[in-house]
Structures are given as C-alpha cells and as structure tokens.
Amino acid sequence: MKTYNFGIVGLGVMGRNLLLNMADHGFAVAGLDMDQEKAGSLQNEAQKDHQIFATVDPESFVKSLESPRAIMLLVPAGSAVDGAIGTLLPLLDEGDIIIDGGNTYFSDTDRRYQELSSKGIHFFGMGISGGESGARRGPSMMPGGDKVAYERLRPIFEAIAAKVDDAPCVEFLGNGSAGNYVKMVHNGIEYGIMQLIAETYDIMKNVYHLEHEVIQESFEQWNREELNSFLIEITGAILKRKEENTFLVDLISDWAKSKGTGKWTSQNAMDLQVPVPVIDAAVNMRDMSKYKLERIQASKLLTWQNTSKVDPVDLEHLKAGLYFAIISTYAQGLAQLRIASDTYGYGLNLETVCKIWRGGCIIRATLLEDFRKAFALQPDLANILLDREIAAKLNASQAGIRSIIRDAIQNGTPVSAWMNALSYFDSYRAENLPTNLIQAQRDFFGAHTYERTDKEGVFHTRWES
Ligand SMILES: NC(=O)C1=CN([C@@H]2O[C@H](COP(=O)(O)OP(=O)(O)OC[C@H]3O[C@@H](n4cnc5c(N)ncnc54)[C@H](OP(=O)(O)O)[C@@H]3O)[C@@H](O)[C@H]2O)C=CC1
Ligand SMILES: O=C(CO)[C@H](O)[C@H](O)COP(=O)(O)O
C-alpha cells in the first residue's frame, strides 16, 4: 500500500493550498476533511506528478501515513482543534507528531502540549502566514515548542516556505507556545498597518480631496520605494479594481469583521503591561466600524464645521508620515515579543523573527531587513526606536506625520492609528512624563504612596490637612 509523508487535517483555504504546495515539492501528502466535496475536489485538482490522497475517513487517512506520522491541523482555532485531536488520538501511535498550523491562542497550545506529551504524542504550534496564495506558493511559518519534532520535519517546511536571499522563511523560534505567540503578534501588527493604510486612504480622499486615480497611483508608486510591502502592494491593486464603471472599494460596506488575533494581541499586551497603542486603535476601529446605525445617527447630531482651508498635500509628507507610523507599529509589536519572551520563557531571537517575516507573510516589507540588521548588531535591543539608524529615519520623517495629523484633526477626520503612532514616539522619547501628578492623585485619594526624585523611599502625604 502507498504511504504518504505528511498529513493535513482541514482542507479549507490554508490546508488545501499548503497540501498542494507540498505536493509541488515532491512530497506525498494525504488530506482529511469532514466535507466530501472538499476532499473530492482536491483529489481532482491534483496534477500528474502530484502524490495526493484525500479522504473523509479518519482511519484510512491515518493508515495512509508513514510512521512516525506527521499530521498538521488547519482547522478553525478553538474547539475544532480539540475535536480533530480527539478524532485522531485513538488512531495514533507513540512518537507520532501533531502540528497545529492555525491561529490558535497560545495558552491552548501549552495545554494541548501537556495533554498530548503525557500520551507520547509530539505536539507543537506553528503559526502560518501568507493567506491563500502564500500557502500555495510559499508562506512564512513560525514554529515553536517541540524542537526534536520540528527538526524531523524541517526539510519539508524549508522546501515549501517563501525564500528571501535563498533563506527559507521558517525557523524554529523558541520554547512552548512561542510559534503561536509570534503569529498572534504578527497579526496584531497586521491589524495596525491595515488601519494606518485605511486612514491614509481616508486622509487622501476626504482631507485633501485627491482623485481616486491619484490615490491608487500613489500606493503603486510607494510600493516601489521605501514603503515596499505586501499590504501597500495589495492596496494599490484593490484601488484599481472596477465593477462596470465603479471602483469596487466604493461598493464595499464599511464594517469589518475579525477573527480575534488582533484583540488577543492587545489583551495580552495589557496583561504584560506593554504599550501597543496602534494595535489597540486598530482593534477599536474595527469595533467602531460595526456601530453603523449609531454612526449614521451621530453624524447628524455631532457636527463640526471646518472653517479653515487645508493647503494642498505634499505627497512626500504623506508618504513620510505613513512610513513613520508603520515603523512605530512594528516597534510596538516587537517590544511586546521581547517582554513576552522573558515572561513566558520563549527564548525568542528577534533577529530570527524579523528574518522569517521578510517574505511570505502578510506583514512582509523591505523595512524588516532594517529591523533584522538592528537586532543582528544589538541582540538585546529593547526597542527598535533605540537603534541609531531607525531613530534617524524617524527623526527625518516626523514633520510629515505632524502636519498630516494636524490637517486631519482640523478636518474632523478620524485618524486614531496615525495619532497613536506619533504619540507612542512622543511618549517613548519623553524623559519626563506627567505621571508624577498621577502618583500624587493616587496617594491623595487612596493613600497609595509615591516615590520622589529628590530622595529614596516611599512617601505618603496627608493632602487634605
Ligand atoms: N485564511 C487565511 O488567510 C489564514 C488562516 N489561518 C488560520 O488557519 C486555520 C484554518 O483556516 P482556513 O483554512 O482559512 O479555514 P477554513 O474554514 O477555510 O478551513 C477549515 C477546514 O477545516 C475543516 N474542519 C473543521 N474541523 C475539522 C475536523 N475535526 N476534521 C477535519 N476537518 C475539519 C472545515 O470543514 P467544514 O467547512 O466542513 O467545517 C474546513 O474545510 C485557522 O486557524 C485560521 O485562523 C492562518 C493564516 C491565514
Ligand atoms: O492570519 C491571518 C492573516 O495573517 C488570517 O487571514 C486572519 O483571519 C486575519 O485576521 P482577521 O480575520 O481577524 O482579520
């Protein structure tokens, strides 16, 4: 009987494309889905030289795999993962490997690792990014946890990963749930950059009243320059698409869904006490977008008449402002990874993280090579804003962000991600913050005590006496 090198459970967007990618690279791959149509259509899609087997029967799926078996789950995060593990477990042998390739919450991975390792099954989480086309042609993959199991499968993952300068965009990242955690923060950064780009589009359209074609061409042009990145590239392509005589983007409703990874990033950043204000703003704005009916009501009641004239925009300023804001967003996400690594004992190397994010993933960008170099030179860098070269880029581009935000505010256009990108920079570079007053207030109403700048110790004042 023919045996297969690798198994994938869940033949939806990611599973189907990753399986075909593996088959393109000469691996024999078996797929399992609960839906006969998905299994059948995959079998039909196989090219002549592909070695593919797709089924809805868990038993024949498991039996088709060479031992020790390697099975990746690409099912929705949460109960579907537990359901798939529950189906497979009675059919597996000690030494088999299960990989969760989905957007799983990191602590679920820690729990599943404990449960499965006690049964002799290797288990690790590996975030995957790149969407449908990345999975098919070369994703970025973020494995962590069981290094022995990962090493056994490394040749398969390196073969199918995106490549930058011949280096595969997959590398073992660290202990425990490191792989899922890094993917979660990747998605938080993704949320932040998407919101910044959406606000930029709004600024161009509604603050400076630029023609749609000028906006579209600007994104295309910026993608050829220092802003080069996947999200800028697809924005140029999206803005080009017409349906009959109308730009498709103008026909799309303004409320956006989300699956939770951005919110998890913000929630966990709060737990770790790491400020990630652009990511928070992006989550807030997706939430705000859902209040459509209230927003329609409020638009009539809460008004602002802009009486001052906005000067024509300098597109170089706008580009510099967006560049500044995007760097600020990466800085926040990478700072969160640094603290999470210490807190959870992941042992992350941020140079490696930046290296495997340079290709294949949704937040790939030319800038990531700058960040990689910064961490290569200073592995303990607390924040990329403290790197001299990155600081110089920000210092040089901040005039742009300040003037654009001023115009947007004057116009009444909401730009919370842009504002938070700047405010992060201004607060991070502030030697003194007004938090001394907060210390005093806490002590006033709650006798919480305070520390002083002129002497050591903990103090309390009877403020009302
Ligand atoms: N789409 C994307 O761009 C990306 C997605 N991800 C993550 O990858 C994971 C998969 O996402 P995606 O491919 O988009 O999801 P899809 O919904 O497209 O596919 C999931 C598939 O899994 C099947 N399934 C669910 N439970 C089981 C089970 N117990 N046994 C066998 N098959 C099962 C579903 O079948 P049915 O439909 O019949 O229920 C469906 O075919 C998620 O965690 C997602 O967050 C990560 C990166 C990018
Ligand atoms: O992981 C991804 C990209 O990296 C997925 O596309 C994810 O679904 C995006 O998050 P959301 O659905 O919340 O926008």
Image (cartoon, rainbow, N blue to C red):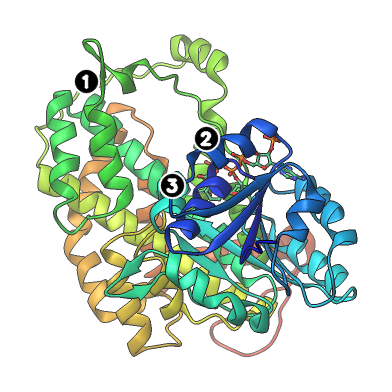
Q: Which mark is residue 286?
A: 2
Question: Disc 3 vs disc 1: Cβ atoms closer than 8 Å?
Answer: no
Q: Distance between the residues labelled 3 and 1?
A: 64 Å
Q: Nearer the viewer, mark 3 or mark 1?
A: 3
Identity of the amino acid at label 2?
Arg
Identity of the amino acid at label 3?
Gln
Identity of the amino acid at label 1?
Thr
- The residue sitting at 26% across, 74% down in the picture is 165
Residue on which the image places disc 1: 307
Comes first in the chain, label 2 or label 3: 3
Observer able to see residue 305: yes
Q: Distance between the residues labelled 1 and 2?
A: 30 Å
Comes first in the chain, label 3 or label 1: 3
Q: Above or below — where is 241 with respect to 110?
A: above
Q: Position of residue 171 (x, y in %)?
A: 49, 76
Locate residue 10 relative to residue 19 in the image: left or right.
Answer: right
Q: Is mark 2 within 8 Å of ligand 2?
A: yes
Observer able to see residue 130: no
Q: Residue 111 appears in which quarter of the rendering?
A: bottom right
Q: Above or below — where is 342 with respect to 184?
A: below
- The residue sitting at 67% across, 78% down in the picture is 149
- The residue sitting at 22% across, 55% down in the picture is 227
Q: Residue 147 appears in which quarter of the rendering?
A: bottom right
**Disc 3 residue crowd, few under 14, some 14–19, many 20+, Cα 10 Å:** few
Q: Nearer the viewer, mark 1 or mark 2?
A: 2
Q: In which quarter of the image is the C terminus?
A: bottom right
